[in-house]
Image (spheres, coloured by chain):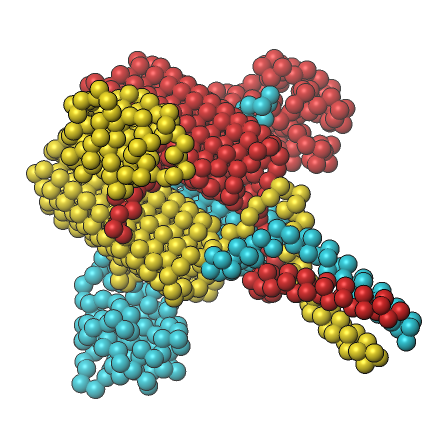
Chain colours: A cyan, B red, C yellow
């Protein structure tokens, strides 16, 4: 990790065809990744979209990930691939220099004697692991994390500093839970009685699949009776609310500041852009895209793109339009009246004519 | 807790009339709660809404909480009550098997010698309690919680792992503060001076009543001069922002992702649905409902339901309508013109006629 | 701090002209700040807006910060200043009685031997500081904070309880990071491949200037390649999402619950009100104001005020208007038709006439 890598090595690992620029050796070393515009001679850059093509001819990169189509336009060595963005993603793993957790339990961690910690796991300073919790092989629990009683953290998963997984919640393999995310807090459930709220204790848990990433300060509440379920391959950004008994299908992605209300069911392979809001108990079909800042108030039966955000404008223009919105129903009625009057007038004239 | 309970015991505790199915004994044991659809023979289910009535006749539950009205339709034993949802809520407390905190101070907690900790309180691993803080009887402070100098945590209250209550903030009795909630961070106050922001130190605190629940990753800021005030019985969901000097009346509920700006005053017995946004300094009367995703920009004087969210649609349809919105003021003017022209034309024809 | 201060001292420190009420001595002591309405005889109040002028004549304050214009209307001693709100802000610093951190490293903190901690810094209980981190002079790290490998915390900065600053992120001087804020979690970046999401490791960092304040539970993600950049003097409220590679210009303020998507560039001296949403890759000019609950979907080239929130109404009225919105494009077409018909009719009549 984070050492220099030769072009030959990169080509092999990324499945790329290496086309060396004149005078360049396949042992030429790359130290990191950059954009076409910012790259220096030791950087690998990438061209993933035709929109950036104009930066290709002047790039100072050591080499560029490109498709066959643009390979000849590249003034430097080329790593020719089918999908440069995918190859770039894979290259980020090669150059990732994030600190690796040390295997073992830090002396200031508080691990209950009845918790099971794999010998290859890492438990950082201040982490707290309650009894009957199971921490799998190669798991990394960051500083001041909390894993509640009976919770299960699957092999290879990582909880960043401050992440919380409450009792009897389970994560599959290779999950990443970012800092201050809270898995398994109580769902928001109360019965109304004589104008007071009587708590419905949340008896379910949270069941998270494999290869799930959950962002910083995101909440996934435990179910009221059954579990809240997050499918495998799901990616959730920061500051997202997933309420109790929500089900999210495999490989769905949810961008930041979104909120999914209780018992909503989101299909597989959906993409919810930032600030999406999904009402309680609705169902969203597989393969749906919800564009940013859309409030989905009812179920969606078929795949497609759905929207609900208004375009902004300068404040004076906005105010004029917004005021009209408040009279839209009246405008519609006036329009209807006009249509009738005009029709009557036309008939009258025709009658005359 | 979480042991099996007999039907006779449940009937007594829930104030229900027990009507046993043929061959069933009142010592019949229930191990947990479930829905009508999912329940097995050891579960207690409930029918709280006529919408679920269709599931009643085929339920495999051991017993069902129902009203008199539906009791005869139930194929299994019945716990007959006036309000099944309320009885269900109470039953969740009976079957709640969340881990109970151990009384005492964990050796890895850092409790200042000048803090007062009731002997029946529990202070978990990694919790930090500053001087002059008062931790009441039967309080539970979760792992890695923080209670600042002079803060007061009332009897029976629970801070879940990672919750933070800053200096001189106070909680009443039986409050629940979920993980990563922050009570008493600085309100957002600055004076503008020569294009820079001069901090207004936030000298007030946060005053929280009895029986209040505050969700994970929710913020309740301290007041600038006086306190931010949360009345008794208030329930606040996850990821909610309560700004400085807000006042929230007793028994008001606020769902996730809502934000209340500074000095807003929310009445008693209000219900703010998810993603509600309340502007600064507005006042909302007792008994108001704000539906999901509504931005309340001015004060509301009388109880009722208030809304502000647009219905979404498929993206092409949405775009067509959204573009028109940007010309709504012009449309209104064209409509007005048409009305005038039509009136003139009518007069002209009448004059002719 | 938090001791009583004489009027003479306050006048000197705040640069005010002291005008004593009859019989009052310049040694008269002030114990704290309050509003004109709530102030008692030991309080200093302020009149910062003509809207509150009506409270001046009956104030029971010990003294009032006012401009020359209103000084004669004040029944008590006056501290006459050009900008009373600014003087009030400065006075809050004088009366701030927030607990001061003790210099030194708490025994329960976990500081890596290869971290550099200034001798004047304070590291509270449960804080974790990783290797190569640099903690500057007079820095205060609150309880259970986390500072990652190689992170830099500039002189005089304060991390409140539970704040997280990940590896290789840097803060300038005199920054305040509130509880549970997360600086440097991974940006949300994935390449789509065969319907799965391949993680793009986030190789950049977060670079924060001087005198920046970041609110509780706010997230500032690390960059994908380069850094996410927060300029000096920037103030960010609670529960705000700042995505990877965002750049925020100096002295810009962002209120709570806002979200800035990836690679957006916000100018200097901007003010984004609560619940602002900025789309990815857009650029906002210096000096822009975005009013509350506005979604900025495209770049803004010139300073000014921009809006996008609809006014709410009672639910029945709202529903009628919202339904019409869903037919707005059709309404526009009907309006166009009417215009054509009316024109044709007019021509017809003129032809007749």
Residue situated furthest left in the rendering: C119
Number of numbered labels in the structure image: 0
Whether B31 is drawn above or below C118: the answer is above
The residue located at (18%, 33%) in the rendering is C11
User: Residue C133, how many percent across, how many down?
Assistant: 15, 47
List x then y, in percent, for residue A177: 36, 46
B23 left or right of C299 in image = right
Residue shown at the point (29%, 79%) measured from the top left: A78
* Residue drawn at the location 7% of the way across and 38% of the way down: C119
Q: Quadrant of the N terminus of chain A?
A: bottom left
Q: Is residue B261 visible?
A: yes
Q: Quarter-wise, where is residue B60 in the image?
A: top right
Q: Quadrant of residue C288?
A: bottom left
Q: Is the residue A96 above or below the residue C126 in the image?
A: below
Quadrant assignment for the C terminus of chain A? bottom right
Q: Residue at x 22, y 30 (%)?
A: C19
Residue B46 vs residue A179: left or right? right
């Amino acid at each position: 990790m984070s050492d220099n890598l030769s072009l030959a090595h990169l080509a092999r690992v990324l499945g790329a065809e290496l086309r060396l620029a004149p005078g360049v050796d396949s042992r030429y070393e790359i130290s990191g990744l950059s954009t076409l515009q910012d790259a220096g001679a030791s950087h690998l850059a990438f061209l993933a979209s035709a929109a950036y093509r104009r930066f290709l001819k002047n790039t100072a990169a050591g080499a560029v990930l490109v498709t066959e189509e643009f390979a000849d336009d590249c003034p430097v060595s080329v790593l020719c691939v089918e999908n440069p963005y995918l190859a770039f993603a894979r290259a980020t793993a090669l150059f990732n220099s994030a600190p690796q957790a040390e295997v073992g339990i830090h002396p200031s961690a508080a691990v209950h004697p009845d918790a099971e910690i794999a010998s290859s796991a890492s438990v950082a300073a201040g982490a707290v692991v309650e009894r009957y919790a199971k921490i799998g092989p190669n798991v990394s629990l960051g500083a001041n994390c909390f894993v509640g009683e009976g919770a299960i953290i699957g092999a290879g998963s990582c909880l960043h500093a401050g992440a919380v997984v409450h009792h009897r919640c389970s994560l599959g393999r290779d999950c990443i839970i970012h800092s201050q995310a809270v898995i398994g807090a109580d769902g928001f459930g109360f019965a109304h009685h004589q104008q007071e709220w009587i708590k419905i204790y949340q008896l379910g848990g949270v069941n998270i699949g494999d290869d799930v990433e959950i962002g910083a300060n995101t909440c996934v509440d435990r179910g009221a009776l059954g579990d809240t379920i997050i499918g495998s391959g799901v990616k959730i950004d920061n500051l997202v609310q997933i309420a109790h008994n929500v089900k999210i299908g495999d490989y769905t992605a949810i961008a930041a500041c979104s909120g999914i209300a209780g018992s909503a069911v989101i299909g597989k392979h959906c993409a919810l852009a930032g600030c999406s809001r999904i009402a309680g108990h609705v169902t969203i079909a597989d393969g749906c895209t919800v564009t940013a800042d859309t409030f989905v108030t009812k179920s969606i039966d078929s795949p497609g793109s759905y929207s609900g955000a208004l375009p902004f404008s300068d404040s004076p223009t906005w105010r004029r339009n917004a005021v009209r919105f408040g009279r839209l129903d009246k405008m519609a009625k006036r329009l209807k009246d006009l249509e009738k009057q005009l029709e009557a007038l036309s008939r009258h004239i025709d009658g005359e004519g």
